[in-house]
Amino acid sequence: MAIEIERKYLVKNDTWRAGAKGRRMVQGYLSRDPHRTVRVRISGEQAWMTVKGPTTGMSREEVEFPLDLGLAQELLGMSLDEPIDKTRYDISFAGMLWEVDEFHGANAGLIVAEIELPHEDHAFEKPDWLGEEVTSERRYSNSKLSKRPWSTWKDEEKNPS
């Protein structure tokens, strides 16, 4: 099982968009247990199931494997809540890969950026379009956003600082 170490930030402006190409994704959650999150994701003609263990700091165990598209569509129909709809953009910056997610539907208006790191204390350069870090704010996790979408948050909740 792999260990996923990532940090998450709000995006404060659109300068990241220059030359960015995105891919649409839909994902639903079959379990949101704090010790085991189970997600089904479809992007184009590809599909995956991901099982994530509990989060400790910015790390968690994760296993991901491909699924047959038809099976994934059936499982997506079994999601606990409305599936997350987003476009993901891969942005290279200072030798690191950033994943910028622009949400649609009930989470429209929310844009976050994530970076996966080889270890928790790995130093990296931050692009100028990054805003507030929200790594430790679980409400920004996709599994929480599927249950309580960003559009339902009060204005003061949308601004973490």
Image (tube, helix red, strand yellow):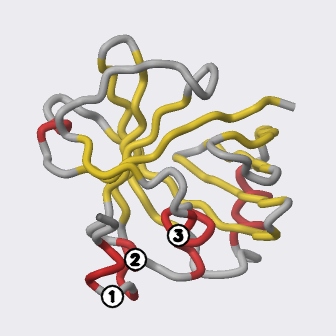
**Residue for badge 2:** 150
Residue 24: % across, % down: 43, 51
Residue type of the residue flagged with mark 3: Arg
Relative to residue 145, is residue 118 depicted above or below? above
Quadrant of the rendering where the N terminus is positioned? top right
Relative to residue 11, is residue 81 depicted above or below? below
Quadrant of the rendering where the C terminus is positioned? bottom left
Visible residue check, residue 74: no
**Residue for badge 3:** 139
Relative to residue 96, is residue 141 depicted above or below? below
- The residue sitting at the top extreme is 95
Count of marks placed on residues: 3
Q: Earlier in the sequence, mark 3 or mark 2?
A: 3
Residue type of the residue flagged with mark 1: Lys
Q: Nearer the viewer, mark 3 or mark 2?
A: 3
Residue 141 relative to residue 161: left or right: right
Mark carried by residue 73:
none
